[in-house]
Amino acid sequence: MYKILVGVASVSAGLVFYYLSQETIIAAPTSQLEQKQTILAILDELSISLTKAYTSIALFSLSLKQNSSEKISAESLSETILSNYNISKELKLAEEKVFDRFFTNEEEFNQIVYNKFGSDEEIQKKLVKMKKCLSNACLGFVIEEAAEIPYDLSPFIVLQITEEFFDIELYLAYKQNEYKSSVPKSIYDSDDEFDEICFEIEMEKNLCKASVFKKHGIFVSEIEANRFLRSATRNFRIVDENFKLRHSELEQKYNATVSQIFDKTIPTEDFEKIKKIYYEHCY
């Protein structure tokens, strides 16, 4: 099955199926497998079964990109991954588990889908989606929003950006807290000026975050910055356990520092660090 999905490099972009020769296509056998609902059920099961394999592929992809002495093109990266014995074996086993459950095999399934459902819009849509999932995994991505994540963005860079984002948010939280401390509570609870300051701080935060991305060679608008980082973070937390652990540590540190800021117990050294990051990106 996965050979069909990865064979697109040898055919036009509009085709979903790929066969080595026309001679391999024979009349489909008559069976329950010829029912559309059965084919859809198998495709749904395949999508679930292949999820773990896609994660393995994405992690392997990130490793290859990180350890390469020079930039690898997306095409070369995909070719290297899909020719890897362990990856091919994992994909094959994931598929066979599903085919066995439906008392069929890869050859029979492919023949029936090609001969009877080659122009079925619903089935073709599912196949295209599966092909896209495999293609994204080869680039290191497993989430549907993969298109939002640049090919060159690595887990290491995302962690750097996250830490700088947190420092900026911490300093802005400090500014907001300082304002609240400078006026009576009865005023800022009902003061339009305080609402305006909060709005300005939020806008400033987004501008600063766009500046952080720019520093790392990624150009996004201030509106896109948060969404962009959320997508990348969610992807790498799924794929990379080390990233997930390090990101959780950054979150814990951020939450602890927020408490220190509002309690006015933050160490001077820590405060100077977040202040420095803020002024690097916001002025």
Image: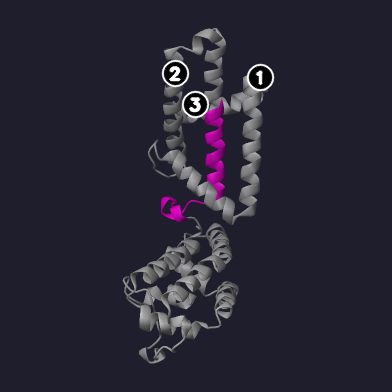
**Mark closest to the chain's N terminus, 3 or 2:** 2
Mark 2 closeness class: few <14, some 14–19, many ≥20 residues within 10 Å: few
The region drawn magenta spans 144-170
Question: Could you say whether the residue bearing mark 1 is in a helix, strand or loop?
Answer: helix
Instruction: Residue 14: give x, y in percent of width and height.
Output: 31, 71
**Quarter of the image containing the C terminus?**
top left
Instruction: Check if mark 1's residue and mark 3's residue have beta carbons within 8 Å.
Output: no
Question: Could you say whether the residue bearing mark 2 is in a helix, strand or loop?
Answer: helix
Of residues 133 and 49, the one drawn nearer to the viewer in this rendering:
49
Report the residue at 42% width, 45% height from top. 218
Name the image quarter holding residue 53. bottom right
User: Do we see residue 270 in this rendering?
Assistant: no
Q: Nearer the viewer, mark 1 or mark 2?
A: 2
> On the image, numbered disc 3 is attached to which residue?
279
> On the image, numbered disc 1 is attached to which residue?
263
Instruction: Check if mark 1's residue and mark 2's residue have beta carbons within 8 Å.
Output: no
Q: Nearer the viewer, mark 1 or mark 3?
A: 1
Name above or below for residue 22 compared with residue 184: below
Q: Is residue 119 left or right of residue 33?
A: left
- Of the residues shown, which amino acid type is indicated by label 3? Tyr
Q: Nearer the viewer, mark 3 or mark 2?
A: 2
Residue 195: image tag: 2
